[in-house]
Amino acid sequence: MLSLEFKNILLTTQLCQYLDPFELDLFLEHSKVVSFERGDIIVAQGKIVDGMYIIIEGQAAVTARILGEGMTSLATLKQGDLLGEVSLIEKGSSATSVIADTAMSCLFILAKYFDLLTLFYPETKYKINKAIMEKVSARLKNIHKKITHVMNETDMITRSVFGEVMKSFTKPSVIEFKEAKLEIENLKKIPPFEIFREDEWDELLRDSTLIKTTDQCNLIIEGDKKPSCYIVLRGAVQSSIIQDNKVAKLSVLGPMLFFANISIIDPSASALINYATRERAILLKISGFENFSRDQKVKELWYKFFDIICKSFVILERSANKLDIRLATELYNR
Amino acid sequence: MCRILSYLGKPIVVEKLLYRPDNSFIKQSYHPIYMSHLLNLAGFGLVAWDNTSCNPLLPFIYKTTQLPFYDENLRNIACKIKPHCFLAHLRGVSYSEKQVVSQQNVHPFIFPAVDIALAHNGMLFGFEHMKYDLIEYIHPTYRKNIQGTTDSEWIYAVFLSQLINTTTTLVTEDIIKALIETLKIIRDIRIKHDLTINSPVNLFITNGEFIAATRFVFDYGWQPQDDKDKAHHAYHSLWYTYGERYGFYDNEYKMKGSKVKSSIIIASEPLTEDSTTWIEVPEYTLLVAHLSEGEVKIVSQDINL
């Protein structure tokens, strides 16, 4: 059982500000207090992180062996900070190490307990996801700023004006669902989309449209404020950062992958990343999701949908970090 | 689907890369982490350059259709040779009696009197419709050297034919130009035959002085409706790591960090389960690494055909 003092510290954290007293108790019930001595490795780079820590006492150093730079000190975490939070959304190995700078006490929740919340308390999981996305969004903005600064400073080749003019004329056309029936049926069976029930699929598809495009068609442009999201059914979409007419590519999204504008998780933000087709493509443009969060009848659908959104941004953050390293190690597009 | 490993830098005992790390190259033949639904059992090949050997411009070549994890000769040789550059390939083909498993089909390909080798991870869909159109783009000298049945050997011949001269020192621009030209030729022949199905072309090219690698797919995301050959539907991976030298440091195999980066590994997948000090090369990218005054320089560019 947590002491009142610890509980009061927890209440000041960003995460707990999203939760009501019942949810906070629920969260604490499934967490445990773990202690570390100075110098203990809490999270090791390259190892799987199996849960999230909230620091309730002490501080820790975040370091990483970065390609081309060696061991690098990245940040100091203090009381109230989260670590390993991304493991609640996307399983994977940690890109950094976290080492206790002082004696520490942390609250720890196993990722598998968090998964169970989906079954019994989806709203609580949604609120925790929202708190984590706030952090991811802030980090994405920072890394975007860093990357665009590097792009400004380097003599990367610039885009051809002709190509950009052609791109602006390339518009997607709407196609009938029967034309891509097979892909939609396949999509329903593939993770993470297999979580939706048939009635939820009906709801998802009700206002959505199927679009067909040629190569080099802009779908989300940096600065777009309107939340929008897509699933690639056939072909591929390229995500990239554009600065000063220079392009730095992040990654390619192939069939059955989801992407969205950042304003879907952070209404104050406009799109940081450009998405354009890299091959001819068929996409599902999901519309009407703004209503999912408001309509009590489809709240559960919204929570599931938000899970998918969160995963896509965690993956995007990894791609952005990778691009940051590449710009430092390679003579890219010079 | 295949696996490729390449190295350029300080001389290294090949065993350190082929056998030692927890996701070693040989382990990738029977237990690959990525795309594990197809094993890489249809041949192993290695070309290696050692400046201290006799005739240093000529690489050491070893090819076998034997399973590499049962190959005692390979293990013995790997413990002895210490090249500064090498390219190794594990061939993975679909489990079908129609596949030709022979030494002539084992990569890397290196024609007589040419010191440039190529290995390929991928497959050109509908290659049987394309190959006679490719002849037009292959120099007569190279046509007669094609011995096997793979699309990769034909790509190699087309690539060599795009190089103005294979005997003089090649600069990065020559390699990039010839590689892009090769991909454009393949693209045009695909268009001619209305071939629009997903076809990965991860190429590794080296002459002992540079390594060039592509991560590229024609018509990515357009699988055939019958969905038979799933191995070639994903975007084949490509990774690299670089540093002073590769070895066992702090209880793990990794590149030793240093201000001067004098060694690079470019491979289909990381050699260790911990991939945090490796960088995955993005899709549609061409990467060229060469040594300049003992330091690795990496040039990369987007492939826009």
Image (cartoon, coloured by chain):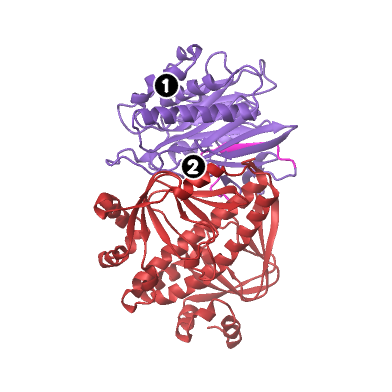
Chain colours: A red, B purple
Q: Is residue B269 magenta?
A: yes
For residue B134, the mark is 1
Three-letter amino acid code of the residue under disc 1: Leu
Q: Position of residue A157 (x, y in %)?
A: 63, 42
Residue B79 in view = no
Q: Which quarter of the rendering shows the C terminus of chain A?
A: top right
Q: Quadrant of residue A39?
A: bottom right
Q: Position of residue B87 (x, y in %)?
A: 56, 29
Indicate whether A334 appears above or below A253. Answer: above
Q: Quadrant of residue A286?
A: bottom left
Indicate whether B162 appears above or below A191. Answer: above
Give the mark count.
2
Residue B146 in view = yes
Q: Is residue A287 magenta?
A: no
- Residue under the image location 35 percent in, 37 percent down: B197
For residue B237, the mark is 2
Three-letter amino acid code of the residue under disc 2: Ser
Instruction: Classify mark 2: helix, strand or loop.
Output: loop
Residue B60 shown left or right of residue B39 in the figure: right
The crowd level at tag 1 (other Cα within 10 Å; few <14, some 14-19, many 20+) is some
Q: Give the magenta part as a residue range.
A: B260-276
